[in-house]
Amino acid sequence: MQLPGIRSSLDAPTSADGHPRVALTFDACGGPAGSGFDEKLVTALIAQRIPATLFLNGRWIDANPVVARKLFAEPLFEIGNHGTLHRPLSVRGRAAYGIPGTSSAAEAVDEVWVNHERIRSLTGRAPRWFRPGTAHYDDVAVSIVHDLGETPLGFTVNGDGGATFPARVVAREVGKAVGGDIVLAHMNQPGSGTADGVIAAIAALHDRGAQFVHID
């Protein structure tokens, strides 16, 4: 998850007037157990005018075409590429969390590019950021992402533990964010504690003067 070429923090940790800048990112992983939509979370982001980057997997887009179109049209959200089949990005098949990685350079290219083109065709804009399934890469795969015109994105704050943390833990972990942090959480598990925890953390961070921003 930490290799040369992976972007994991904001270039500018504070705003011109001294406020800590924090970027929220939310993965939508897709697949049989990962194609839900956390409407409570996304509705709260829109209501509070909180910008975020949404990393959408190809399978999630296919399972949620109507919701995806609404997200594409919302200017608060930048759409990131979360891969075609939600696989760790590798050229040797290295697994992460029991999920087999792509096993060749060609498979790594497909994992990035097929969903890149899907997002570009649906939004009219090519995604700038790529985060693979599990957020794991190998060094060759990092180079492949750059060669395909995207930037591999990591994170500094694991906000919801893959949507497994209860709300109080999500609130605590996301609430730890400081200027320059990129927070990773999930928007595809509506039964998790992510929405309530993130909403509580946003209030706490606002109280500390944080500004929520897109990745620069």
Image (cartoon, grey):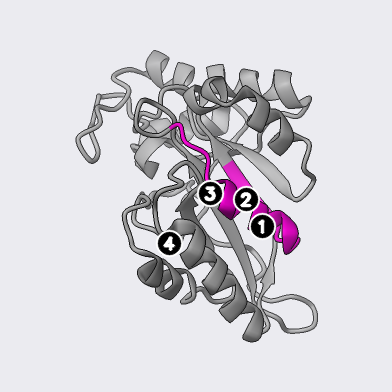
Which residue appears at 63% of the width and 48% of the height? 53
Mark 3 nearby-residue class (10 Å; few <14, some 14–19, many ≥20): many
Q: Disc 1 vs disc 2: Cβ atoms closer than 8 Å?
A: yes
Q: Find numbered disc 4 in the image and state the secondary structure of the residue it sits on.
A: loop
Q: Dot 1: within a 10 Å radius of its alpha carbon, few (fewer than 14), some, or many (20 or more) residues? A: some
Q: Where residue 89 sits: x, y (%)?
A: 37, 31
Pick the quarter of the image with the C terminus. Answer: bottom right
Pinpoint residue 184: horizontal percent, then vertical percent. Answer: 47, 55
In magenta, the rendered stretch is: 35-54
Mark 2 residue type: Val
Q: Secondary structure at mark 2?
A: helix
> Would you say the residues marked 3 and 1 are in contact, meaning their CB atoms lie under 8 Å apart?
no
Mark 4 crowd level (few <14, some 14–19, many ≥20, 10 Å Cα): many
Residue in front for this viewpoint, 92 or 126:
126
Q: Position of residue 194 (x, y in %)?
A: 45, 58
**Which label's residue is closer to the chain start, 3 or 1?**
3
Q: Which residue is mark 1?
A: 45
Q: Is residue 165 magenta?
A: no
Q: What element does badge 3 sit on?
A: strand
Q: Which residue is mark 4?
A: 159
Mark identifier at residue 26 = 3
Q: Name the residue: 75% across, 50% down.
A: 76
Please tell me how crowded label 2 is: few (under 14), some (14-19), or many (20+) other residues with Cα within 10 Å: some
Q: CA distance from mark 4 to mark 1?
A: 16 Å
What amino acid type is highlighted by mark number 4?
A: Gly
The answer for how far apart the CA atoms under marks 1 and 2 are is 5 Å
Task: Give me the C-alpha separation between circle 4 and circle 3.
Answer: 10 Å
Q: Which residue is mark 2?
A: 42
The residue type indicated by label 1 comes to Leu
